[in-house]
Amino acid sequence: QVQLVESGGGLVQAGGSLRLSCAASGTILSLYTMGWYRQAPGRQRDLVALITRGGSTNYADSVKGRFTISRDNAKNTVYLQMNSLKPEDTAVYYCNAKYFTPGGNNYWGQGTQVTVSS
């Protein structure tokens, strides 16, 4: 059973930083493209950052230069370092794992709340 567990969310003032973690169990994380998504109330779930098996990254324009995604395959964990946080970054942040083969399985964590106060 594949399980993704996010942690590190919380309440922070604008301009502050948080680091989210996503720990995987029941599988080998190096076989997956990993992503962080977020969903604010009343809005769709959007991609924030992506990291491939080879370490290539991709970011939403709104977070470029402020957020950094990384992975530690030895620890089966993916991270999202969030700096210079803004109130508009407030959302539930979800970890996603997509198996590397076409049509591969797709897994989600339960989400962690990030609230940025102005």
Image: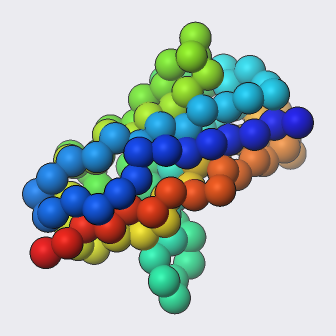
Q: Residue at x 57, y 58 (%)?
A: 111
- For the N terminus, the image quarter is top right
Quadrant of residue 2 within the rendered picture: top right
Coloration of the structure image = rainbow
Q: Residue furthest front?
A: 11
Q: Is residue 58 above or below residue 45?
A: above
Q: Residue at x 56, y 70 (%)?
A: 45
- Front residue (pair 101, 38): 38
Whole-percent x, y for residue 99 in the image: 77, 35
Whole-percent x, y for residue 115 in the image: 32, 67
In the picture, measured across the screen, residue 68 lies left or right of residue 53, that is left
Quadrant of residue 100 within the rendered picture: top right
Q: Residue at x 81, y 28 (%)?
A: 26
- Front residue (pair 108, 101): 108
Q: State how many labels appear.
A: 0
Quadrant of residue 32 within the rendered picture: top right
Q: Residue at x 14, y 64 (%)?
A: 14
Whether residue 31 appears in this view of the structure is no
Q: Is residue 28 above or below residue 50?
A: above
Q: Residue furthest bottom?
A: 42
Whether residue 97 appears in this view of the structure is yes
Whole-percent x, y for residue 68 in the image: 32, 38
Q: Is residue 13 above or below residue 87?
A: above
In the picture, measured across the screen, residue 15 lies left or right of residue 65, that is left
- Front residue (pair 114, 81): 114
- For the C terminus, the image quarter is bottom left
